[in-house]
Image (cartoon, helix red, strand yellow):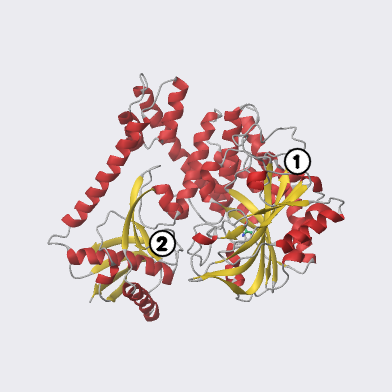
Amino acid sequence: MTTNEIRTAFLEYMKQKGHAIVPSASLVPENDPTTLFTGSGMQPMVPYLLGQPHPLGKRIADSQKCFRAQDIEEVGDNRHLTSFEMLGNWSFGDYFKEEQITWMWDFLINELHLDVNNFYVSCFKGNDELHIPKDEFSLAVWKKLFKEKGLEVSAGENPEQDGMLPNQHVFYYGEKKNWWSRSGVPGNMPEGEPGGPDSEMFYDFDPQGEQKIHENSKWKNEPCHPNCDCGRFLEVGNNVFMQYKKTANGFEELPQMNVDHGSGLERFACALRNDPDIFNIDVYDEAKKLLVERSGKQYAEDEITTFAMRVILDHIRGATFLIGDGVMPGNKDQMYFVRRLIRRAVRFARNLGINESFTASVAKTFINTYKEEYPILHEKQDSIFSELEKEENKFRKTLEHGIKQFEKVATRNISGVDAFDLLQTYGFPIELTEELAKEKNISVDLEEFARLKKEHAESSRTAAQGKFKGGLGGDGEMEVKFHTATHMLHEALRQVLGEHVQQKGSNITSERLRFDFSHDAKMTDEEKKKVEDLINEQIAMKLPVIREEVSVDDARARGAIGLFGDKYGDVVSIYRIGEGTTRGDKNLFSMEFCGGPHVENIGTLGHFRIQKEEAVSTGVRRIKAVLE
Ligand code: SER
């Protein structure tokens, strides 16, 4: 079965079971400030899981395009993808465990003919402290289904220590493995977040131990079991029994018992081929063929080639879908990741000897592969091609200049100063310096490099502070307050008007703050009041202001906003208002890139009032506000 056929079969199956099929939502979530991208099928479903009625009923299914930015660096092995599709079905307080498990079995084993001998599942072991019981019910349903196929299976109670005994196909794991929420384990969930125990499904690629996948991995001295990361097993899907909500005092039952099932479409395809390399499934065929033609190398020729081709296949597919959803390469927020995908792909293309423009041609193959399912890609193809080409060419120039400079200094081992200069002056990533040095058999002083980078980050921060204070005069106490209030205003505007709001300018005197931002309509009185109220509510909560030094990547992954640079791996300072560390945490109000200075606690700010809201230019508004 082709991947497209599997998708159709799943949706058809769920339709027969009474589900309304909905189209994939955009990769850029609407009204969900907790995350930059749609990374799972359930994200657009959160309101309905929490109890809001879905207009199409209690049974919904779809195939959702997803993007997981946090996995960029993981891509290159045989299973990680940043860009994939998730097959999903949901019960909003309708059917529950028994139906879900039985249907998944029926679909995978009876419809897709997945080999039952290679099929494994896991269930939640329970947690006394959280008062969440062991999921013996789900386990019993799975056991019954195995038995119907003639497999009398027993349960592994402690697989991480005991490994797998013969005839065990069902396993219990704790909350690190068998609990699902958008923020992971129960301890990380903010108040109000829904979550629940889950039951995962796995496929075994080495049932006879012939390929010795586990023994050839770094886990060889540990017992192998379905949730071990050695590569023998692939988790193909997850049935979440979304029945709890986190509260200040632990967990309470949601008003309804929900099912949230999500499976990797590409992973199903991979399991059905009985080949653990996900990049061998049909959706990559055309693109792979093109890379083989352009490079003159075979996909499985050697490790470097395979790795580079995987990165390109994943990244260009991701960039194609993202640009299709309107995210152009750039410096900020979602746009930064598109830039990063393209640049990484170009960088790895060098390892294949592809030194001419290729990203648009690869995108074309994906547009063709998905022409029926995602016609938006075809509609947007002009902008997909031109954005890819522009970014690729820009980065190629950076690379060329950097490589020339590298050649100049590479007559000896590369000092930290040289490596840092390559990054700072030529925008040449350190990974590339390392790679080229390796080719020449010379070393790079990474320690010195790291020290210089850190020093630089510190001095730019000090400079930023100096500039800020210098521009203000006096002791600046009022200005510092206005500066903190500016962060709050930025965040409040995004919450009230939407995520499109971005800072366009800021100016502070001891009397007032002035803030320019992107928004194309005059604010209503009601909106202004909402912004004021939101800010004053936070001030009343006396939240602390906390400064932190983090990598740009980490800050972005955690959802920090603001204007930031375009250098890989830079260390920056962010200011948080509230104790939470990630955007979406309930006790975090704002998190922004900034050099400071700020007040220590917003309780000292007084009362925030908007004096004036006006247009500055097309699409840019200006607010003047005071603290009283
Ligand atoms: N929410 C679960 C997941 O993303 C199942 O849809 O894995």
Number of residues whose C-alpha sits closer than 10 Å to that of mark 1, classed few (under 14), some (14–19) or many (20 or more) = some
Q: Nearer the viewer, residue 243 or 375?
A: 243
Q: Nearer the viewer, residue 303 or 159?
A: 159
Number of residues whose C-alpha sits closer than 10 Å to that of mark 2, classed few (under 14), some (14–19) or many (20 or more) = some
Percent across and percent down for residue 267 are 69, 47
* Residue 441 vertical position relative to residue 133 in the rendered view, above or below: above
Percent across and percent down for residue 133 are 64, 65
Q: Which residue is mark 1?
A: 274
Question: Is residue 356 in sight in this rendering?
Answer: no
Q: Is residue 49 left or right of residue 596?
A: right
Element carrying mark 1: loop
Q: Quadrant of ligand 1?
A: bottom right
Q: Amino acid at mark 2?
A: Gly
- Residue drawn at x 16%, y 62% is 476
- Residue drawn at x 54%, y 42% is 74
Q: Amino acid at mark 1?
A: Asn
